[in-house]
Amino acid sequence: MTLEGRTVAVIGSGYMGGGIAQVLALAGAEVRIADVDADTTRANLDRLVAEARAFAAEDLFPAHAPDTIAGRVHAAESFEAAVEGADFVEEAVPEKIGIKHEVLRRVSAAAAPDTVIGSNTSTILIGRIAEAVQRPERFLGVHFSNPAPFIPGVEVIAHAGTDPAILPGVEELVRAVGKQPARISDADGFVLNRLQYALFSEASQLVDEGVASAEDVDTIVRTTFGFRLPFFGPFAIADMAGLDVYRFCFESLQGRWPERFATPRALAEHVENGRLGTKSGGGFLDVPAERVPELVAYRNKAYARMAQLIDELGPAPLGKEDDR
């Protein structure tokens, strides 16, 4: 699917909104951006084209990207002008409920009654933002990650009043820009930030306790379980490791932190039922026994290729030049 013939409005043309506008335009949409005033919007459009030129020079965008973005992204004079006749609207204004309510009141009043409106919020409950939206049944969260042009995952978050019929169309739009949608319930932190901040909290405690430095914690994360994460999520990794092994490790950690590392109910139930992961033919995910050798071969190839990529790129420029 392409977005040829579709008109999309992006409200908020800063770093996140601008990146979303770029990928929409590259997927074929006519994109209108709008910000606090027309001068800001025009300046941000100039920045998006210049940024696309730099990305193309680095082979991060296709060679045609600067011209495509210059031709398909348009600076609207106002929020209302941006959403007039739009098929879809993405709100990407600052993460403050008062600002979002003010903007979405204007946007939802000006947009056509059947225009679907998404919010790029990363932390605020969609149901709370929806309080300012006319016809909130056409409103949901569509949360891109930073930097939007390059991170593939998008949370699609329906609130209690969202019409389920709009979800497939939004997911098609997300796929059309080369992203991977995942349906998420409207809960504090959604999925991305609940997991991200849980990891950061535990990492910070390790540093505070003197177990390791921040640099060494980062090294372990990116070279062990983090190394696996581009290819497998936590449930696939657990299934391959063995859920009985996971339960044993939780029980071991409970000797020091009985509540913090209480065995998850679902894990205990799987083990009690003999569902130990890929070695038993099923766990959190069902992988047929005949596909396990194929899975193992994919895993090994993926990890070897990741190591080659990291070696090719070299270390990230986080420290002094002479530390690298």
Image: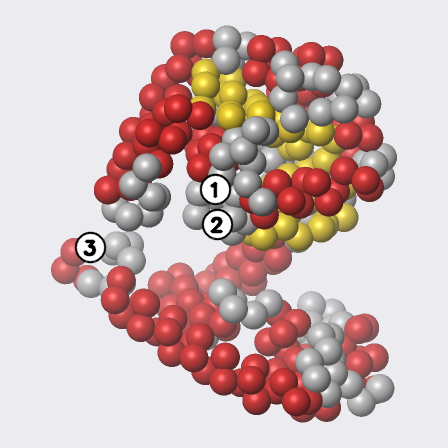
Does the rendering let one see residue 129? no
What is the x, y in percent for residue 136? 80, 27
**What residue appears at the point 49 percent right and 85 percent down from the top-left corner?**
297
Q: Is residue 258 above or below residue 86?
A: below
Residue in front for this viewpoint, 42 or 59:
59
The residue that label 3 is drawn on is: 320
Q: Quadrant of residue 100?
A: top right
Q: Is residue 163 above or below residue 311?
A: above
The residue that label 1 is drawn on is: 148
Tell me if label 2 and label 1 are in contact, CB under 8 Å: yes
Q: Secondary structure at mark 1?
A: loop
- Please state which amino acid type lies under the numbered disc 3: Lys
Local packing at callout 1 (Cα closer than 10 Å; few below 14, some 14-19, many 20+) is many
Q: CA distance from mark 2 to mark 3?
A: 27 Å
Q: Earlier in the sequence, mark 2 or mark 3?
A: 2
Q: Looking at the image, which residue sits at the far left?
A: 322
Coloring scheme used = secondary structure
Residue in front for this viewpoint, 48 or 16:
48
Local packing at callout 2 (Cα closer than 10 Å; few below 14, some 14-19, many 20+) is few
